Image (cartoon, grey):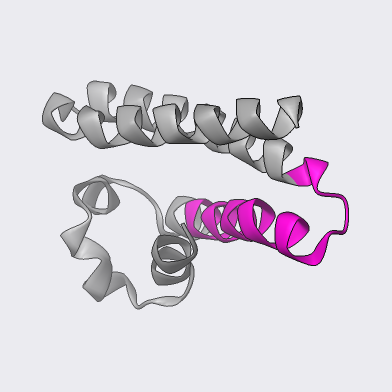
C-alpha cells in the first residue's frame, strides 16, 4: 500500500498510465487515492510496530476493505472485471488482519 500510494500521490501523471483506471480519472482523484493508500499503509504498520494505539491497525484494515469495495465498483463501472480479483485478495487479507487484531 505504501509503494502504490506513493506512486499515485507523487509520480508525474504521464507515468501513471500503467494503471488502467488513471486514464479516465481526474488527477485530483488519483492523488486522493494515493494519499489514502499511504495513510492506510502507515496505519497498518506503525501502530503495531510502535505500540502506540495498536487498535488503529484494525481500523486501517477495515478502511482498506472499504476502499477495495469502492475499487471493485469502479472496475465494474469501467468494464474492467478482469481486475477485480486483485481487490478481492486484498479484501480477504485485510479482513484477516482486522479480525485478528480485534480479537487479540
For residue 96, say whether it is visible: yes
At 47% from the left and 50% from the top, the residue drawn is 29
Does 99 sit left or right of 46 as displayed?
A: left
- Residue 79 appears in the picture as rendered: no
Position in image of residue 50 (x %, y %): 79, 66
Q: Is residue 53 magenta?
A: yes
Residue 86 in magenta? no
- Residue at 61% over, 51% down: 40
- In depth, the one of 43 and 80 nearer the eye is 43
58 vs 26, nearest the viewer: 58
| Number of disc labels | 0
The residue lying furthest to the front in this view is 104
Q: Position of residue 22 (x, y in %)?
A: 28, 53
Q: Residue drawn at (68%, 53%), measured in percent from left and top?
A: 43
Q: Which residue occupies the extreme left position in the image?
A: 82
Relative to 78, is 38 on the left or the right?
Answer: right
Q: Where is residue 30, by image quadrant?
A: bottom left
Q: Picture quarter containing residue 64?
A: top right
Camera-side residue of 14 and 1:
1
Q: Main secondary structure of the magenta part?
A: helix
Task: Name the spot of residue 8 as percent of width and height, x first.
Answer: 41, 64
The range drawn in magenta is 32-56
Q: Residue 57 location in percent, x, y?
A: 70, 45
Residue 100 image-quadrant placement: top right
Residue 17 drawn above or below residue 44: below
Residue at the farthest right position: 52
Q: In the displayed structure, would residue 38 be above or below residue 64?
A: below
Taking depth in this image into account, of 87 and 47 the one nearest to the observer is: 47
Left or right of 71 in this view: 46: right
Q: Quadrant of the C terminus?
A: top right
Q: Give the residue at x 47% y 70%.
A: 6
Amino acid at each position: 500500500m505504501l509503494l502504490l500510494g506513493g506512486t499515485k500521490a507523487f509520480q508525474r501523471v504521464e507515468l501513471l498510465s500503467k494503471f488502467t483506471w488513471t486514464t479516465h480519472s481526474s488527477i485530483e482523484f488519483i492523488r486522493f487515492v494515493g494519499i489514502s493508500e499511504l495513510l492506510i499503509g502507515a496505519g497498518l504498520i506503525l501502530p503495531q510496530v510502535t505500540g502506540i494505539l495498536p487498535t488503529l491497525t484494525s481500523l486501517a484494515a477495515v478502511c482498506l476493505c472499504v476502499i477495495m469495495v469502492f475499487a471493485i465498483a469502479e472496475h465494474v463501472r469501467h468494464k474492467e472485471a478482469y481486475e477485480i480479483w486483485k481487490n478481492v485478495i486484498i479484501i480477504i487479507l485485510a479482513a484477516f488482519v482486522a479480525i485478528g487484531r480485534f480479537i487479540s
